[in-house]
Amino acid sequence: MPTKIRLQRHGRKGYAFFHIVAADSRAPRDGKFIEKLGVYNPNTNPATIDIDFDGAVKWLENGAQPTDTCRAILSYKGVLYRKHLNGGVKKGAFTQEEADARFEKWMNDKAAKIQQGAAAIVKAQDTAKSDALKAEVAKKEEIAKKVAAKSSPLAEEVAVAEGEEPVAETTEAPVAEETAAVEEAPAVEEAPAEEPVAEAEAPAEEAAEEENKAE
């Protein structure tokens, strides 16, 4: 019976995750399977892969053929490399201890690469957030400068030159004119008041002189 290692889809629309299964190649994709080997969730960063390592190696050694996606997953987790080392041990190319040492070294190097990749992703996200924050601050400063420029004295001079009178000038001018009119009015009315007094005293002096002459 031709056996394949493939993905079986689960989850809702837009948030799918997959089971890694060994199934008959003639069965439907989401139909019956022989054995579940693991879970693959691409929605996390990095993707979550939980796999039965020994079971996957066993199926590969028994002739199961993985699909392209499953082959990439098994290679990423080191299943294919473990199968290759087991084949070398069977052929007598090296001992089991040497195969185990090689595989452990490979796993350590792989873990370091994964950690570096995760750190690079976190750094890229932090950089993107920082750039977005700087852009927002720059935009706010530009808006504040525009508002300050509109309310500056230079802006008022430009408005006057264009024919718009400032509010302060229109309100203060009538008050100044009324004050000047009130201060000048009494000076005009007091001058004629002294002249009639002088005219009234003159006839009285002439009458006194005529009476003296008559005596």
Image (spheres, rainbow, N blue to C red):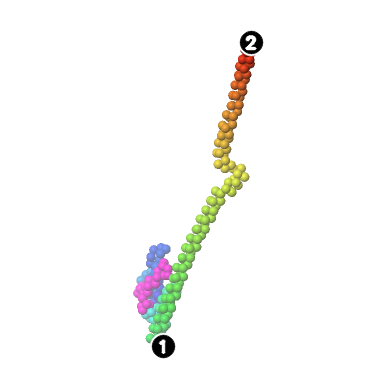
Q: Nearer the viewer, residue 47 or 199?
A: 199
Based on the displayed image, in which of its 4 quarters is residue 40 positioned? bottom left
Residue drawn at point x = 46 percent, y = 65 percent: 126
Q: Relative to residue 200, is residue 35 depicted above or below?
A: below
Q: Is residue 29 visible?
A: no
Q: Which mark is residue 94?
A: 1
Q: Which mark is residue 214?
A: 2
Residue drawn at point x = 37 percent, y = 70 percent: 31
Q: Count residues near mark 1 (Cα–Cα under 10 Å), then give few for <14, some for 14-19, many for 20+.
A: some
Helix, strand or loop at label 2? It is helix
* Mark 1–mark 2 distance (CA, rounded to whole Å): 172 Å
Residue 110 located within the stretch drawn in magenta:
no
Identified by mark 1, the residue type is Phe
Based on the displayed image, in which of its 4 quarters is residue 2 positioned? bottom left
What percent of the width, then of the height, locates residue 92? 40, 89
Q: Relative to residue 168, is residue 207 depicted above or below?
A: above
Q: Relative to residue 191, is residue 177 depicted above or below?
A: below
What percent of the width, then of the height, locates residue 145? 54, 53
What percent of the width, then of the height, locates residue 36? 35, 73
Identify the residue at the far left of this view.
35
In the displayed structure image, the side of residue 147 where residue 41 appears, left or right:
left
Residue 37 located within the stretch drawn in magenta:
yes
Range drawn in magenta: 33-56
